[in-house]
């Protein structure tokens, strides 16, 4: 859960509309997957400052009260697992599911480290709850997740969001950190013109 990634869905929607023949593949990264320490005041304030910057830059909504529990551990592994499990049933809605998770966290202040909350968000989509639960805890999902993490490490993804182009198995950096639609579209046009 990256706040700048929450700022990016409007850009993605515009890209999908402007470039309907291009496909978008979501690759999950190991951002905050191994965090075990509760947020202290310094980290909480840093996160809130980031949220304010994202809101100012993108106009995406946030609940700035950040009412996470006092001992909140900002760990994203379960969110990543839920996205992979969801993708087993509804791959065409993967980005919509991600947006729903982001909205639950950034706008509704829901604790996405809770499996119950993840299931609650998932229930807004037409998925088989039992199959989702089985997939969520499966070794297959763990392997797929590690494949995403390995790919993101191989591609040296260090800023979020990151967009890359891929053709014939070769990747090229398009966006390394938040960028408004006009700048992303200009980069796409430069790549396709060359």
Image (tube, rainbow, N blue to C red):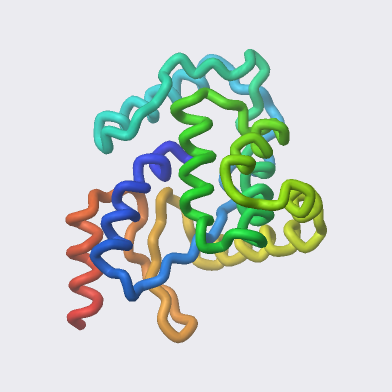
For image coordinates 54% across by 61% down, the residue present is 152
Quadrant for residue 6, please give it.
top left
Residue in front for this viewpoint, 23 or 69: 23
> x, y percentage for residue 138?
81, 56
Q: Residue furthest bottom?
A: 168
> x, y percentage for residue 113?
67, 33
For image coordinates 29% across by 60% down, the residue present is 15
> x, y percentage for residue 175?
33, 59
Residue in front for this viewpoint, 68 or 176: 68
For image coordinates 27% across by 37% down, the residue present is 58
Give the left or right position of residue 83, taking residue 20 as reference. right
Give the left or right position of residue 132, taking residue 180 as reference. right
Work out whether 57 lies above or below 92. above
Quadrant for residue 91, please give it.
bottom right
Give the left or right position of residue 163, taking residue 14 as reference. right
Q: Quadrant of the C terminus?
A: bottom left
For image coordinates 62% across by 33% down, the residue present is 112
Give the left or right position of residue 17, taking residue 128 as reference. left
Residue in front for this viewpoint, 123 or 171: 123
């Amino acid at each position: 859960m990256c706040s700048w990634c929450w700022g990016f869905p409007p850009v993605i929607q515009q890209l999908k509309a402007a470039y309907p023949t291009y496909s978008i593949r979501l690759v999950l990264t190991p951002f905050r997957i191994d965090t075990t320490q509760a947020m202290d005041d310094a980290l909480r304030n840093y996160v809130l400052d980031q949220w304010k910057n994202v809101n100012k830059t993108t106009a995406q909504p946030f609940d700035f009260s950040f009412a996470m529990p006092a001992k909140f551990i900002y760990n994203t592994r379960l969110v990543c697992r839920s996205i992979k499990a969801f993708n087993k049933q509804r791959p065409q809605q993967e980005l919509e599911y991600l947006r729903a998770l982001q909205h639950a966290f950034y706008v509704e202040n829901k604790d996405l480290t809770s499996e119950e909350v993840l299931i609650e968000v998932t229930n807004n989509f037409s998925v088989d709850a039992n199959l989702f639960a089985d997939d969520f805890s499966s070794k297959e999902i763990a392997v797929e997740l590690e494949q995403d993490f390995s790919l993101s490490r191989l591609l040296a993804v260090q800023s979020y969001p990151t967009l890359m182009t891929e053709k014939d198995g070769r990747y090229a950096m398009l966006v390394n950190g938040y960028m408004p639609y006009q700048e992303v579209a200009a980069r796409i046009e430069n790549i396709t013109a060359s």
